[in-house]
């Protein structure tokens, strides 16, 4: 009898442990049309916790320890679904079908002209931004909790139908978030289509390694593995040039604080209102390579960014204006967060010299980005 009892306890314990290892969706409210939204929580063995919801495949929170072992939430966002439904500057979301800008909301593919919604107008010049009026950040994705040795994950899936937001082709897309015991937040993108279509999907989290709501990010020190940028017009559309950063405020080949040169009179800085540009990464062969290092000196938090993508948009929160109230109840003010969005270059469908973003039928898009966390 005693042996039987021990066996039952062992079975129950093993089952509970397995179940606890595979994240389960929890209710997080409903959209305006009544669609349920769920939230998934990923944890690792070293105290990192990531929470993401099915609306926009949005990362709501990411808790990491500082050099003293004290955890803080290092991404900007909100506590409730209702706040996201009111509209945000893409806090934590997956953006697409085409992240970043397409000039005039137009492109030509296989001899056919396509017109997209123009939902952004920097410098008075209209463009399509982050997939249009209802991009991937504003849809509810299917989700499945995952587990494997040393990692928890959640796989988000979405079918973007032919003609959605003006794009051709039925696009089947999956984005999987893994949180590993090596302190990696690994993002794996996979996509297929039945018609040729531009695809440029990215993750749009705003980071503040001091902790969200804890002021500006100007003291964060950045290093980029990138010797060139794609300079832009006043409408923030690339000119087509690949410009060396040496001798400019865009040179982060050695560490510099964000605030050191952000108010430079450089014309490019004026166009972006600060940093809002695409860096051409040194690694261009599609292998996973280091793109950026961010160090926050007061907490010791460090973030490395690795990617298979050829570019990375660095945006330092130039349009944050205090209207968004964060999770800690504090307004997000000017430059209270920064983004490092791994991507293909902006406006690539209209820039034949840039790496192509056109996904063809019968081909599978695969892309990986890793945000790696530590403290010292």
Image (cartoon, rainbow, N blue to C red):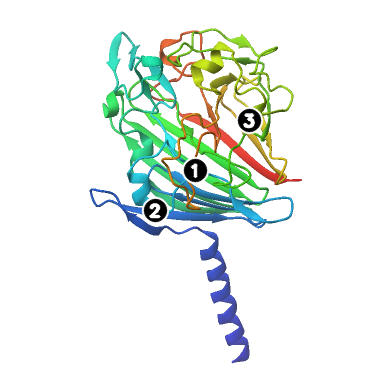
Locate the C terminus and report the quarter of the image it occupies.
top right
Q: Residue at x 37, y 45 (%)?
A: 84
Mark 3 highlights which residue? 288
Residue 176 numbered tag: 1
SS of the residue at dot 1?
A: strand
Looking at this view, is 42 or 137 the one in front?
137
Q: Is residue 141 visible?
A: no
Q: Is residue 182 visible?
A: yes
SS of the residue at dot 3?
A: loop
Distance Cα–Cα, label 2 vs label 1: 23 Å
Distance Cα–Cα, label 3 vs label 1: 16 Å
Mark 2 highlights which residue? 80
Q: Residue furthest bottom?
A: 1
In the image: residue 270, left or right of residue 36: right
Locate the N terminus and report the quarter of the image it occupies.
bottom right
Q: Residue at x 28, y 17 (%)?
A: 115
The x, y position of residue 211, in whole percent, is: 59, 47
């Amino acid at each position: 009898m005693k042996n039987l009892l021990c066996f039952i306890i062992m079975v129950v314990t093993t089952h509970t442990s397995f179940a606890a290892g595979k994240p389960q969706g929890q209710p997080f409210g409903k959209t305006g049309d009544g669609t349920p939204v769920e939230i998934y929580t990923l944890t690792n063995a070293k105290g990192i916790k990531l929470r993401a919801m099915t609306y926009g495949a949005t990362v709501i929170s990411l808790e990491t320890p500082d050099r003293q072992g004290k955890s803080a939430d290092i991404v900007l966002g909100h506590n409730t679904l209702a706040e996201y439904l009111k509209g945000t500057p893409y806090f934590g979301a997956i953006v697409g079908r085409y992240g970043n800008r397409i000039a005039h909301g137009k492109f030509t593919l296989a001899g056919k002209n396509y017109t997209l919604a123009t939902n952004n107008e920097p410098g008075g010049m209209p463009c399509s931004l982050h997939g249009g009026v209802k991009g991937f950040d504003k849809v509810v994705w299917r989700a499945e909790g995952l587990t494997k040795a040393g990692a928890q994950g959640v796989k988000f899936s979405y079918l973007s139908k032919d003609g959605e937001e003006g794009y051709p082709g039925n696009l089947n897309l999956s984005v999987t978030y893994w949180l590993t015991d090596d302190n990696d937040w690994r993002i794996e993108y996979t996509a297929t289509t039945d018609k040729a279509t531009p695809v440029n999907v990215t993750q749009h989290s705003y980071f503040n390694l001091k902790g969200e709501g804890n002021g500006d990010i100007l003291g964060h020190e950045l290093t980029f593995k990138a010797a060139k940028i794609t300079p832009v017009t006043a409408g923030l559309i690339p000119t087509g040039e690949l410009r060396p950063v040496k001798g400019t405020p865009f040179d982060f080949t050695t560490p510099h604080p964000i605030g050191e040169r952000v108010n430079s009179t450089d014309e490019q800085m004026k166009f972006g209102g600060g940093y809002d540009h695409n860096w051409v990464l040194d690694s261009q062969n599609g292998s996973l390579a280091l793109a950026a290092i961010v160090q926050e000196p007061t907490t010791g938090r460090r973030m490395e960014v690795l990617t298979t993508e050829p570019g990375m948009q660095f945006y330092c929160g130039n349009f944050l204006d205090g209207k968004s109230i964060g999770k800690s109840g504090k307004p997000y003010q000017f430059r209270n967060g920064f983004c490092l969005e791994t991507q293909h270059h902006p406006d690539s469908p209209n820039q034949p010299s840039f790496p192509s973003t056109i996904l063809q039928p019968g081909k599978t898009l695969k892309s990986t980005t890793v945000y790696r966390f530590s403290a010292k």
